[in-house]
Image (cartoon, rainbow, N blue to C red):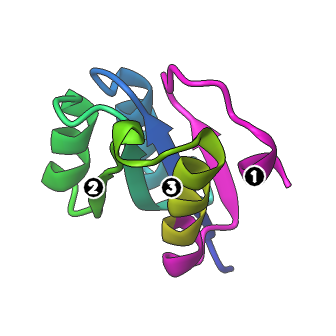
């Protein structure tokens, strides 16, 4: 059975992310974390992802002139990693129409 490819958006310590990683590794979650994306460069969740061998990417919202531009950049990464389901694990930003669509 194919595992669902997850993209996890994070902003902080990553305790929720760690629970997802642990459950997937234990076979209790029929999914794999394909990529972790954070809006905060210093988020410890990125380190948790790296330690688990998962691509960990920081996308700085301040680098984009508008929220939609930031979300398009996040969406491009999710598509690059062929994400099928996006999980918000302590992500502290509102998700807008670009990602929701």
Residue 61: quarter of image: top left
Disc 2: which residue: 56
In the picture provided, is 67 more to the left or to the right than 21? right
Sequence-wise, the earlier of marks 1 and 2 is 2
The span picked out in magenta is 78-101
Disc 3: which residue: 27
Q: Residue at x 42, y 34 (%)?
A: 10
Disc 1: which residue: 98
At label 2, counting other C-alpha atoms closer than 10 Å, the crowd grade (few under 14, some 14-19, many 20 or more) is some
Q: Residue at x 81, y 44 (%)?
A: 97
Q: Position of residue 9 (x, y in %)?
A: 49, 41
In this view, the residue farthest toward the front is: 65
Between tags 3 and 1, which lies in front? Answer: 1
Badge 2 element: strand
The answer to whether marks 3 and 2 mark residues whose Cβ atoms lie closer than 8 Å is no
Between tags 3 and 2, which lies in front? Answer: 2
The answer to whether marks 3 and 1 mark residues whose Cβ atoms lie closer than 8 Å is no
Residue 1: quarter of image: bottom right
In this view, the residue farthest toward the right is: 101
In the image, 40 versus 8, the foreground residue is: 40
Q: Residue at x 51, y 61 (%)?
A: 73
Residue 84: quarter of image: bottom right
Badge 3 element: loop
Label 1 vs label 2: CA separation?
21 Å
Q: Is residue 86 above or below residue 54?
A: above
Badge 1 element: helix
């Amino acid at each position: 059975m194919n595992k669902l490819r997850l993209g996890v958006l994070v902003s902080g310590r990553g305790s929720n992310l760690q629970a997802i990683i642990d459950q997937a590794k234990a076979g209790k979650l029929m999914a794999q974390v394909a990529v972790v994306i954070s809006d905060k460069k210093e988020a410890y969740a990125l380190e948790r992802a790296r330690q688990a061998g998962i691509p960990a990417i920081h996308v700085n919202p301040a680098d984009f002139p508008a929220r939609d531009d930031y979300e398009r950049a996040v969406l491009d990464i999710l598509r690059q990693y062929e994400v099928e389901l996006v999980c918000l694990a302590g992500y502290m930003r509102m998700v807008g129409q670009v990602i929701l669509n």
